[in-house]
Image (cartoon, rainbow, N blue to C red):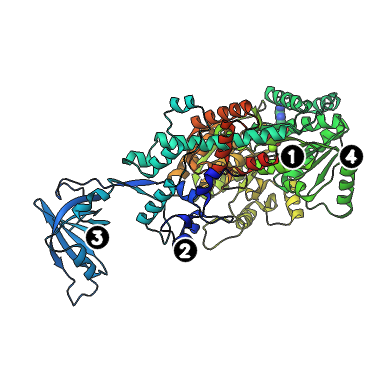
Amino acid sequence: MRPSVLDPLFAPATALSGVGPKLAKALNKLLGDETHAARVIDLMFHLPTGAIDRRPSESIAEAPIGEVATFSAQVTEHRPAPPTKAKAPYRVIVEDETGDVTLVFFHADVRHLLQTLPIGAYRIISGKLELWDGMRQMVHPDRILDPKLAATLPSVEPVYGLTEGIGGRVMARIAAGAAERCPELPEWQDPGFLTRHDFVPFRNAIHALHHPVDLKAATGETVARRRIAYDELLASQIALALVRRQQKAAGRATAGDGALRHAIETALPFTLTDGQRKAIADIHDDMEKPERMLRLLQGDVGSGKTVVALMAMAAAAEARRQSVLMAPTEILARQHAERLAPLADKAGLKLALLTGREKGAGRRQVLEGLANGEIDIVVGTHALFQEGVAFHDLALAVVDEQHRFGVHQRLLLGAKGEAVDILVMTATPIPRTLALTWFGDMDVSILSEKPAGRKPITTRAISLERYDEVVGAVGRALDAGAQVYWVCPLVQESDTLDVAAAQERFEALQAIFGDKVGLLHGQRPGRDKDAAMATFSGGQTRVLVSTTVIEVGVDVPNASVMVIEHAERFGLAQLHQLRGRIGRGSAASTCLLLYKGPLGQVAEARLTIMRESEDGFRIAEEDLRLRGEGEVLGTRQSGSPDWRIARPEIDGDLLAAACDDARLLIERDPQLETPRGQAIRTLLYLFERDVAIRLLRAG
Ligand code: ADP
Ligand code: MG
């Protein structure tokens, strides 16, 4: 049950004075979602994005031009629009001994103006001051006040994100009202901790954020904001720690004799890197423990994650248990199955492929083999798990190339088999802060080195205007025996978007290079996709024109040239992932980033980083810096932490602290029963960490 102290915050926004049905509707648009209308808490967390300085100037002469100015002056003249020009504005002149200002009103309510600005009266005026023909003027002042009411004008006025139907003043009033309803909350952290960080109580911090005392307080890094951000990060880390504990508890030991692993290792055409050996050892240690394995394998493109997965699956087979390997696309699932089959064969492992395309008798056979335990390893897409496939004895689920496999999905997966061990493999490295926020419940293995013998890739950015030269270079590369990926952003030519279509490029290149050119995109039938992939992989086609379907995982070592058309439209992680398709063989590789100028700042920065670096860990950090968390991982995925205040990518130090603190707090009070534990429950409700709340209810 939600602690009743939070009730005032979870009341609908209409509980605030001055919020009627009309305003509520606008608020819902801004702050509500599918599950609920705007609530008091949404307004409380709707913090100012900036502030307006309304501190008065000494005189009109000293009032700043081009910004919001506040001054006091006497009304000296009303100048109605001439009757011949009905649309001209109504003007009011105000002045002091240093100068005058023309106040300009369009569609004026004259009676109202005569009342608020009577001739001879002194007024405090505030609004944006401009120069027009050398004269000071102010169009529609924000504030016109009787000097007697000067005290009611805050010197710094918070600015809020708005939507149609809600003005700045109204928003400021109701947001402040919401902050007012924030109750005194019990502290979830030690008094010593709070003192060390100068943290004021939660309620005071919220109040301070809605009532900034100066411009810096409204926008900058204040202690109040840090406090709230820390609390939010702490809530998410505690939630992950609770998930971890619940998940771990469900495990069982899977221990093999090493025979299959040994057989596979001897069959490999290469020796494992130290990083691979270490990751394999980490995984086996986990599997042998009676706890469930929750491990994230981070490695750059081409670092050799697949074989690590295979060794893990072999270990499960040694214990006569089954494994599933899930890929994000069908192409990749197929490729995995093809690659792994010979190795599995040599070790006497039975491996099957199951995607939406396996139908009829073949499909039935696989399903039977899984149910009776004949099949050791099944490779498929992520959909595999949604389809109610029955296993004889599933021990291990490997999720390949999946950044967005959030807590919710992992919980679902964990609930499927009997305490299956879980290994998630990322497509490219993800920055530490994101690893903590997304996978904070998991242990991490990192493959930091690439297999020996990889040659660096030469990356160049070239304007699309030099298309003909690029085609010439591709021709020379083909003559030299290379294979080429040519990546286009969209499938069909669109009139509104100036995007090179894969279909069109395919035809253009085919006109030059003939049947050496193949085409691969997501809208082709599955069989055609297979054929396109197979002929390229087998070397019959030498140029593969494709959309980003080849982005993840595809592995054709002889391909050493990649052309990416409209590279400026791709994200950094995507470019890196695409480029990772080349540089896999013995030949030197080249990546040509074709862009259409003029380039925006961010696009230019991306292309520069791509030219400078091949290090996926560095690129991931830069990507985060350029884009922010939401976009790196796909925005607002279910199960994603949905940040109200904290910006994990920026608040890295706070996040690291919150992570350590969360584990400590949970360790000290596993059932959250002490007064501090009760306060932590309040914190979880406050930031709506639903997963954790459900676990607490169940436990
Ligand atoms: P990713 O980590 O991107 O999934 P893959 O598992 O697809 O990488 O491996 C990329 C390529 O490197 C494959 O062709 C694989 O056979 C090869 N490979 C993996 N490990 C090694 C190694 N230790 N030495 C040499 N080649 C390796
Ligand atoms: Mg891979």
| Nearer to me, 528 or 684 | 684
Mark 1 in CB contact with mark 4 (< 8 angstroms) = no
**Which of labels 4 and 2 is toward the front?**
2
Q: Secondary structure at mark 2?
A: helix
Q: Which residue does the numbered mark 3 point to in the structure image?
A: 139
Image check: 686 left or right of 485?
left
Q: Which residue does the numbered mark 2 point to in the structure image?
A: 21
Q: Type of residue at label 4?
A: Gly
> Residue 571: x and y, percent?
54, 44
Query: Few, some or many C-alpha atoms within 10 Å of disc 4 (few <14, some 14-19, many ≥20)?
Result: some
Calculate the distance from the C-alpha at mark 1 to the C-alpha at mark 4. 20 Å
Q: Secondary structure at mark 3?
A: strand
The answer to whether residue 244 shows anywhere in this view is yes
Q: Which residue does the numbered mark 1 point to in the structure image?
A: 414
Query: Mark 1 or mark 2, which has the lower sequence index?
Result: 2
Residue 440 image-quadrant placement? top right
Calculate the distance from the C-alpha at mark 4 to the C-alpha at mark 2. 61 Å
Query: Mark 4 or mark 2, which has the lower sequence index?
Result: 2
Calculate the distance from the C-alpha at mark 1 to the C-alpha at mark 2. 44 Å
Q: Secondary structure at mark 1?
A: helix
Q: Type of residue at label 2?
A: Pro
